[in-house]
Amino acid sequence: YLGISSKLYEYQAVGKPIICCADGQPAEYVSETHSGIVVKPGDYEALAKAILYLKEDKVIAEKFGASGRELVVNNLPIEKIGLLMMSVFKQVLEEQVT
């Protein structure tokens, strides 16, 4: 899921359920990680229903949030992200020098 916004990881990291109004990889990611609800872009009625659903069903909202949080804690520790970023920076700098 390299093409998704880092915001999704941030929402997951704080344990919040996600309402994803997008197609493609972001929607697939939210669906496959069980961290929120996917709504078709532009479907404002479905968006309103999703908001009310999560507001009214705290258990489901908490499950979505916990699922996302667990995924980030287990797979994206800050140390790992730091090492990946350093690798990217190093590669970019090496390309600039040559």
Image (cartoon, rainbow, N blue to C red):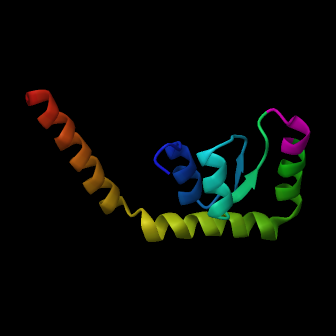
Is residue 34 found inside the magenta-colored segment of the image?
no
Q: Quadrant of residue 77?
A: bottom left
Is residue 44 found inside the magenta-colored segment of the image?
yes
In the figure, 68 relative to 82: above or below?
Answer: below
Residue 92 position within the rendered picture, expressed as x and y whole percent measured from the top left: 21, 36
Residue 63 position within the rendered picture, expressed as x and y whole percent measured from the top left: 71, 70
The residue sitting at 60% across, 63% down in the picture is: 68
The residue sitting at 84% across, 50% down in the picture is: 50
Residue 29 position within the rendered picture, expressed as x and y whole percent measured from the top left: 60, 55
In the figure, 17 relative to 98: above or below?
Answer: below
Residue 70 position within the rendered picture, expressed as x and y whole percent measured from the top left: 55, 70
Outermost residue, left direction? 98
* 42 to the left or right of 81: right
The residue sitting at 89% across, 60% down in the picture is: 56
In the figure, 44 relative to 83: above or below?
Answer: above
Q: Which quadrant does the C terminus fall into? A: top left
The stretch of residues the image draws in magenta is: 42-47
What is the chief secondary structure element of the magenta stretch? helix
* 15 to the left or right of 2: right
In the figure, 91 relative to 70: above or below?
Answer: above
The residue sitting at 77% across, 36% down in the picture is: 41
Q: Quadrant of residue 94?
A: top left
Q: Quadrant of residue 95?
A: top left
Q: Which one is in front, 86 or 23? A: 23
